[in-house]
Image: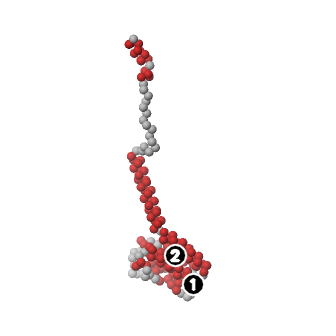
């Protein structure tokens, strides 16, 4: 009988097999260490650039407010036709913006030609030295202007300066000015 049972087993070799034990299914977040490191670096860059963007946006709040005020001053200047009042308001706006970004010692005492040179230096331009920009020097105090005031041009100058002034262009008080 012993012989018979061994023959049965040899006839059916699959009868002794067991089911294969499969490994568990990998999850969606079962990543290699290198992928986790890459993900951490990418997230760090995203957060860093978001931080820089928010900081830049917050630091330029005064510019956005000044541009809105410039628009209302320009509209009022066009409607009223009072050039002296318009120039006085533009000068006050530019001075307030300058005092926001630059030190009081550099800006507060500036007037007339020194003021326009400051505007040129701080915006890395020569737009305020042009003949048409002369109205910004003392136009608010003149009874009659030498030439008609171009409100759009003056507003464009103010807009340019508000958007483009940078302390890095200012290298201290210039003796040649």
Residue 164 in the image: above or below residue 12: below
Q: Which residue is mark 2?
A: 158
Residue drawn at x 42%, y 43% is: 30
Mark 2 crowdedness (10 Å alpha carbons): few <14, some 14-19, many ≥20: many
Q: On the image, which quarter does residue 16 sit in? A: top left
| Closer to us: 162 or 23 | 23
The number of numbered discs placed on residues in the rendered structure image is: 2
Instruction: Quarter of the image for the N terminus: give it.
Output: top left
Q: Real-space Cα distance between discs 2 and 1?
A: 19 Å
Display colour scheme: secondary structure
Q: On the image, which quarter does residue 44 sit in? A: bottom left
Q: Which residue is mark 1?
A: 147
Q: Earlier in the sequence, mark 2 or mark 1?
A: 1
Q: Position of residue 41 (x, y in %)?
A: 41, 53
Q: Position of residue 147 (x, y in %)?
A: 57, 84
Q: Is residue 133 visible?
A: no
Q: Position of residue 65 (x, y in %)?
A: 51, 71
Residue 96 in the image: above or below residue 5: below
Q: Disc 1 on helix, strand or loop?
A: loop
Residue drawn at x 42%, y 18% is: 9
Residue drawn at x 56%, y 73% is: 71
Identify the residue at the far front of this view.
1
């Amino acid at each position: 009988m012993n012989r018979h049972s061994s023959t049965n087993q040899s006839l059916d070799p699959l009868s002794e097999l067991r089911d294969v034990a499969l490994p568990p299914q990998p999850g969606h977040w079962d990543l290699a260490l290198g992928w986790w490191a890459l993900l951490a670096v990418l997230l760090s860059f995203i957060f860093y650039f978001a931080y820089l963007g928010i900081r830049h946006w917050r630091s330029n709040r005064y510019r956005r407010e000044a541009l809105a005020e410039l628009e209302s001053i320009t509209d009022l200047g066009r409607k009223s036709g009072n050039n002296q009042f318009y120039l006085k308001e533009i000068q006050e706006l530019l001075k307030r913006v300058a005092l926001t970004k630059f030190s009081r010692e550099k800006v507060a005492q500036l007037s007339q030609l020194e003021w326009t040179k400051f505007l040129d230096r701080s915006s890395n331009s020569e737009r305020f030295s042009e003949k048409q920009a002369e109205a910004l020097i003392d136009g608010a105090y003149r009874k009659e202007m030498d030439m008609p005031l171009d409100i759009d041009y003056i507003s464009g100058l103010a807009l340019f300066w508000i958007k483009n002034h940078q302390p890095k262009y200012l290298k201290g008080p210039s003796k040649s000015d």
